[in-house]
Amino acid sequence: MFKIQWDKKTGGVLLGSVVTKETLNIAPRPVFYEELNLLGLNNLGWSYPECEEPLMWACNKEYYYRGEFAFEVKGANIYEKATVVLQSGYEKLKLVPVNMKAMLEKTKEQMFLCESEAIEFIRDVYDTYTGANRLSEMYAANQMDFEVLAAKQEKRVKQKMAIVKEDCDSFDIMPESEAQQQGKKVLQTTKIDYFLASFSGGKDSQVVLDLCTRALPPDAYQVIYSDTGYELPSSLELYEEVQAFYKKRFPTLKFNLVKNHESVLNYWDKIGTPSDKHRWCCAVMKTAPLYRTLKVPGTNKQAKVLAFEGVRAEESSRRSGYERIGKGVKHTFVTNARPILKWSTTEIFLYLFRHGLSINKAYRLGKPRVGCIFCPFSSPWDDMVVNQCYPNELAPFLNRVTDWAKDRKIPNLTEYISERKWKLRASGNLVNKTSSVEFLKSTKDFIAIVSNPHVDIFTWLITIGDFTIDKKGSKVYGEFKYNKQVYSFELDSTASNKYKFTVFNATDVILVKLLRRIVYKSVHCISCEACEVECPTGALSVYPEVKIDKNKCTHCHNCLNFHDHGCIVANSLETTMDNKKNVGNISKYGTFGLHEEWLEEYFLDPQITYWVKGNNSLGVKQIPSFKAWLKDAEIINDKNLITPFGEFCAENIINDSELIWSLIWINLSYNSELVKWFVNNVNASQLFNSTILAEQSMEHFASSFSRTTIEYAFQALVQVFNYSPIGDYLLQGEKVDKKSLTRNEYTGISEVAVAYSLYKFAEKNNAYSLRVKDFYDTEYENGVAKEFCLSSSTFEKALRTLNSAKDRVLIAELNMGLNHITLMKELTSLDVIKRLF
Ligand code: SF4
Ligand code: SF4
């Protein structure tokens, strides 16, 4: 909230409201003697007392003593301590602790303002929602549900509506823009069953809990701590300490420690390690156990919860966009209130110091953030601290990752662990499993071949619609209702624990998607708990076995749509989605990428004679590589002749380099296995180079190609980024430094390219009625959002332009909850560019 600067007199910091030349760019964290000991400063000639107070401050990897840069740290990984690089003049130093009393005195006014404002916010939120609770009870007698009314109105008037609380203690529903204009108090929900301070062992949640104890009566809320099973020992200790501390002061304040029914290592074995792509651990080990304890008393129905949480904007760019109060950010039944959203790290520590609250020992050891013991989202620095300080607790996880890497014969094992390459797991290809599903291609029927499912398919079929069944021998026949239509199905048990499930005439894309999801759930469900909390009616319970009460199920599909594949476990186990057996050739490019000047040269004379020696400037090894790229770009055919698409580009859009290369990139994403893997697996902002891509894709390609072939193939892809506009102009492989590139959203994409990509997608999936959100679903491969990392706002903007174009090629309905795109079956992707260009 406040600007921070050093205070040389106290050795601490000052807070202020105006920016001066002394203002720091980064909020520093305090550094204690434990961290300096870990770094070995006591053996490097420094002396300092082993005291409670901080001795210095750190901004990332730079350490400051009394406002002066004293040293920086380099390196550090799970096996090696960091190297300390002392600044000249700091070789020998006798540290004096920060004068806490003086620093806290100098910052007290600003901290008082921070705290008072946060306390007022907590009280205000609590009063507003308890008031709304009372009102909604009053209205419940008249059967009035304002949330349902607002949702209905939104659909009718196609405008976002807000429920507002009037001064005279009544509700009103009005357009959100009007409510904002009139400064009305907008309610996210009209009923809260439980108020909650979620505690994680970290400093931020600790501050929020303390603020809640100061703002609210102790029996108004409860404290819940989710023990993931690989918590840092210091976090568990702090939880016990915090509980004892507040219980003494507020005996009626409820504390609750919750856990998943199964251990985290068992889940690692069953569904693979958490990774950059598969972040199942938070949902399964943390959130699901937490919210499963919060049901409406006497029922299985999910209670409505208001959680005061320690999210801060400074933590990430995503969080910086959060509102202070929001509903349904992750779960529809949770309203999140964030009292310290704008606080800095420094202010958080100052609060803990001011109020004499205990600090998680992991911070004293130098961990900037407190999370799980071995986490894909922490850093090599975190690994170093954990391995130095908690080797026994880390050992089971580290051993598991090491053993798996040995089984897979990963070369350079030390580097694989120290550089955290294990977190790149993208698929479940190498996870041991006995269950499987294969979806057969059919123009009109939905067909799944299932082996060893964990759950009866009819258990999950209830979620799609009411159904009837009739058994005859090894076959089960039946019908279910979906969207007012009746569909027939057949289940043929071909062998014990193996069957073929067919739904006839299932051509509706949404239905097909839902059917795939119930099949995935039935094949892979291990009752991980994650989807139960998505059920708004209490119909679904998953542990110890899946049960769905058909009288309560409203077929809302929340439990199917909450996650890709409809199941967090199936998603983690995906075997690179049905194409593992059929990985296309990636060695055809050699190590050469597609060069812009080669294409320019070819387009000047796109005849078959171009390929004759002497008619081009290419080296002998470059020719087959260039041909392979041009074929995958659909510019030449198998006979090396130019295609109609190639001709159109050469004759009409040769001067529009960004459009040509956008179209090429789209074609490559369908025809080049390498590019297809890239667009579907490498996230925006991820740093990469050919080695990282090879490692990340190993599970996908390893069953078909050697490690060397995979590495060469990605060297060729990196050349595409370096030698064509796809890299720096379309931002799909933008140079960051000598060693790394990154992907970014290509906001400058032309509407022609968007339309072309939509038609390619439709041709591939035989689906001409689409939804914007399908393009963000990992179940579908490719699509313009993944090809260019488009945000939904950029995508929708292009759709609106196309919708109002004179020669329109699609209808986009994007108002109020609608996100439908209708394409014209009679047009091909090539027709579309001809028509729009
Ligand atoms: S269906 Fe999937 S997400 Fe739901 S409980 Fe089972 S394993 Fe978990
Ligand atoms: S989430 Fe919806 S579809 Fe799933 S069980 Fe509950 S009511 Fe039925």
Image (cartoon, rainbow, N blue to C red):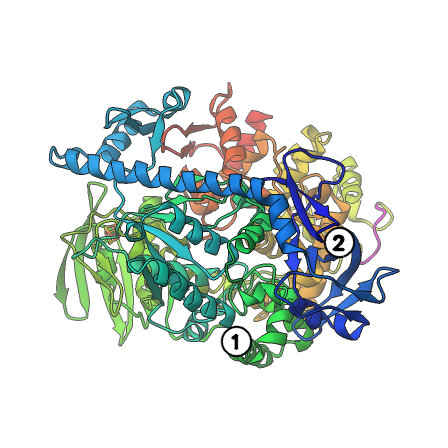
Badge count: 2
Going by the image, does 417 lie left or right of 394?
right
Q: Is residue 328 magenta?
A: no
First in sequence: mark 1 vs mark 2: 2
Name the front one of labels 1 and 2.
2
Q: Is residue 620 magenta?
A: yes
Q: Residue at x 43, y 42 (%)?
A: 119
Mark 1 lies on residue: 397
Name the spot of residue 272 as percent of width and height, x first. Answer: 47, 70
Name the spot of residue 32 as percent of width and height, x first. Answer: 65, 64
Q: Quadrant of residue 281?
A: bottom left
Q: Residue at x 47, y 38 (%)?
A: 117
Name the spot of residue 49 as percent of width and height, x first. Answer: 70, 69
Kindly identify the amino acid type of the residue bearing the numbered disc 2.
Arg
Q: Nearer the viewer, residue 27 or 676?
A: 27
Element at label 2: loop
Classify mark 1: residues with Cα within 10 Å, few (<14), some (14-19) or many (20+).
Answer: some
Q: Residue at x 54, y 33 (%)?
A: 794
Report the image quarter containing ligand 1.
bottom left
Mark 2 lies on residue: 66
Kindly identify the amino acid type of the residue bearing the numbered disc 1.
Phe
Q: Is residue 701 visible?
A: yes
Classify mark 2: residues with Cα within 10 Å, few (<14), some (14-19) or many (20+).
Answer: many
* Main secondary structure of the magenta stretch: loop
First to last magenta residue range? 616-621
Going by the image, does 25 lie left or right of 490?
right
Name the spot of residue 416 as percent of width and height, x first. Answer: 65, 72
Answer yes or no: disc 1 within 8 Å of ligand 1.
no
Relative to 268, residue 442 above or below: above
